[in-house]
Image (spheres, rainbow, N blue to C red):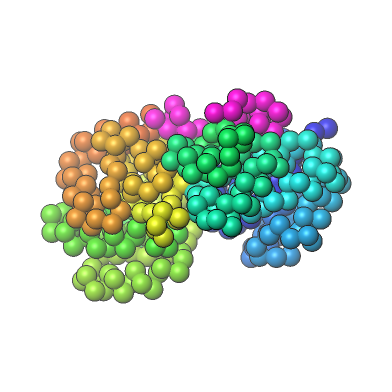
Amino acid sequence: MHRTLVVTNDFPPRQGGIETFVKAMADRFPPDRLVVYTSAEPGAAAHDAALPYRVVRDRARTLLPTPRATARAVALAREHGCGSVWFGAAAPLGLMAGRLRREAGVRRLVATTHGHEVWWARTPGARTLLRRIGAEVDVVTYLGASTRAPIGAALGADARLARLVPGVDTGVFRPGGAPGPVRRRYGLGDAPVVLCAARLVARKGQDTLIRALPAVRARVPGTRLLLVGSGPYERRLRRLADAHGVTGAVVLAGGHAHAVLPSFYAAADVFAMPCRSRRRGLEVEGLGIVYLEAAAAGLPVVVGDSGGAPDAVRDGGTGHVVDGEDAGAVAHRLVELLTDRHASRLMGEKGRDRVLREWTWGRTYDTLAGLLGGGGPSQ
């Protein structure tokens, strides 16, 4: 029986877009045909015990392609008769590919790229390693044109590329959820609410939302900014809110499990994550599953113009693309969406329709299964 070994650092209970992507794919495999090899994480034992497939945790908090970790991946592939391997994020774990093919007899290896591989593609030493990964796996997947270009250039003309995009569980993320629980918990009342759900890091643009908030509140009194997520930027964001006189209007709700995010979307009027590219284009947004989840929940979205993020929206149709550095432009779009509720509702409806047509996990799994089985066209 053909089994697949998933090798990844990005797996719950760790939170993030890639984690959501990898878990959504893992859950769609027949349970007896999947083994996940991933890093240690607090709370993992209880999380993994509830899953129907086997998860093997390394002792390290960050899994790297060291000789020890690679040997363990090889042993797992042998033990479970894995004929295929999926690297949930190509770099750096895709460097295990050669040994897995030679020593475990793995026949198909697929490595998925997101946003951070753009840094690898544009940095000389890392670029060489990325090219090596491309040479040793059968297929490298990409999210969209903006990430394909630099990654494909780094891999070379002979690289085998295929598009593999995330999706949304539209039965879970849907309009009509109850706004009351989140609004009561965080004291939001009936205020207009702008939601951003993302790690608190500089690239995501929560600081731009805070800088835009005074102008938004001048036009839409009482507007609150609800930030869901955790990360190293939290202290700076609190200071920024104080400096702009909006401390009472900014709610930092902390990190939450993916399963409870629908309740936050239900409590919001607009979703905004004005992400921006950093470090001279080395750090970009790959796509942004949260934009798709928000659209599936019927919200208009404000999207930063970084990397593949604009692919998640039809500008002017399901939301707006903005310069993630321009607080004035962000404020302008937020005011539009908060004051013209009819137009916002139509954008939300169009956004959900688009997700239903183009961004489903079932379609993504079918593509991945085809690639792991040796099928699926290169794109």
User: In the figure, residue 69 lies in which quadrant?
Assistant: bottom right
- Compared with residue 318, is residue 100 higher up or lower down, i.e. above or below? below
Magenta span contains residue 363: yes
Q: At 83% across and 32% down in the image, what residue appears?
A: 1
Quadrant of image for the C terminus:
top right
Regarding residue 50, the answer to whether it shows in the image is no
Q: Where is residue 282 in the image (x, y as percent from the top left)?
A: 45, 55
Q: Where is residue 110 in the image (x, y as percent from the top left)?
A: 66, 39
Regarding residue 131, the answer to whether it shows in the image is yes
Q: At 37% across and 65% down in the image, what residue appears?
A: 252
Q: At 23% across and 57% down in the image, what residue appears?
A: 327
Residue 135 left/right relative to 309: right
SS majority, magenta: helix
- Compared with residue 170, is residue 276 higher up or lower down, i.e. above or below? below
- Compared with residue 37, is residue 371 higher up or lower down, i.e. above or below? above
Magenta span contains residue 260: no
Residue 193 left/right relative to 221: right
Nearer the observer, 189 or 285: 285
Nearer the observer, 149 or 369: 149
User: In the figure, residue 226 lies in which quadrant?
Assistant: bottom left
Q: Where is residue 176 in the image (x, y as percent from the top left)?
A: 37, 39
Q: Give the range drawn in magenta.
A: 354-379
Hey, which residue is sitting farthest left in the picture? 219
Q: At 74% across and 35% down in the image, what residue appears?
A: 108
Residue 58 left/right relative to 214: right
Q: Where is residue 83 in the image (x, y as percent from the top left)?
A: 79, 37
Nearer the observer, 196 or 177: 196
